[in-house]
Image (tube, rainbow, N blue to C red):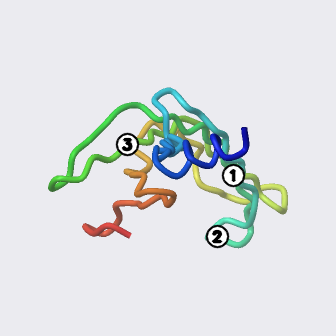
Amino acid sequence: MRQTLLFILAFFPVYIYCQLPDYLPNGATWRINRIGLSSQFDCWFKDEIVCTVTGDSVIGQQPYKKITAHGYYQEFGIVMGTNCSSPYVHDELYALLRQDSLTIRIWANDQDN
């Protein structure tokens, strides 16, 4: 039995097929919550963003996934009566990402990083 198994393994090559995981499936979402000092240094900011993979885009010959951001930004004065920036709603293109084997690449500043 052992010799038969060795014969089969020696003369019939075994092919292993492996599929890379899709890190950016359409519809995937994640949340980004940021809190810190704003650029005015006398105001705190709170930024709540939900990012969603919303489709494909092609730059050159490379396919990228569109990441859109929806959320709310607001600032609070550290001292009562401090003038801070007005709140606003995020509804914008956040990033263009592509999967290259097991790494994620981003399109920024007109180049693939």
- Circle 3: element type: strand
**Rendering coords of residue 36 (x, y %):** 75, 63
Q: Which amino acid does label 1 sit on?
A: Glu
Q: In which quarter of the image is residue 88?
A: top right
- Circle 2: element type: loop
Q: Which residue is drawn at 69% across and 52% down?
A: 75
Instruction: Please identify, in this view, whether the residue under mark 2 or under mark 3 is nearer the observer.
Output: 3
- Circle 1: element type: strand
Between discs 2 and 3, the one toward the N terminus: 2
User: Which residue carries the number 2 mark?
Assistant: 40
CB contact under 8 Å: marks 2 and 1:
yes
Q: Which of 7 and 43 is in front in this view?
A: 7
How many marks the image carries: the answer is: 3
Q: Which of 17 and 51 is in front in this view?
A: 17
**Circle 1 residues within 10 Å: few <14, some 14–19, many ≥20:** many
Q: What residue type is labelled 2?
A: Gln
Q: Which residue is drawn at 50% across and 27% down?
A: 27
User: Which residue carries the number 1 mark?
Assistant: 75
**Rendering coords of residue 108 (x, y %):** 35, 65
In this picture, residue 85 sits left or right of residue 99: right
Say above or below: 112 vs 19: below
Q: Which mark is residue 65?
A: 3
Instruction: Please identify, in this view, whether the residue under mark 3 or under mark 1 is nearer the observer.
Output: 3
Q: Residue at x 61, y 70 (%)?
A: 39
Q: In which quarter of the image is residue 87?
A: top right
**Circle 2 residues within 10 Å: few <14, some 14–19, many ≥20:** few
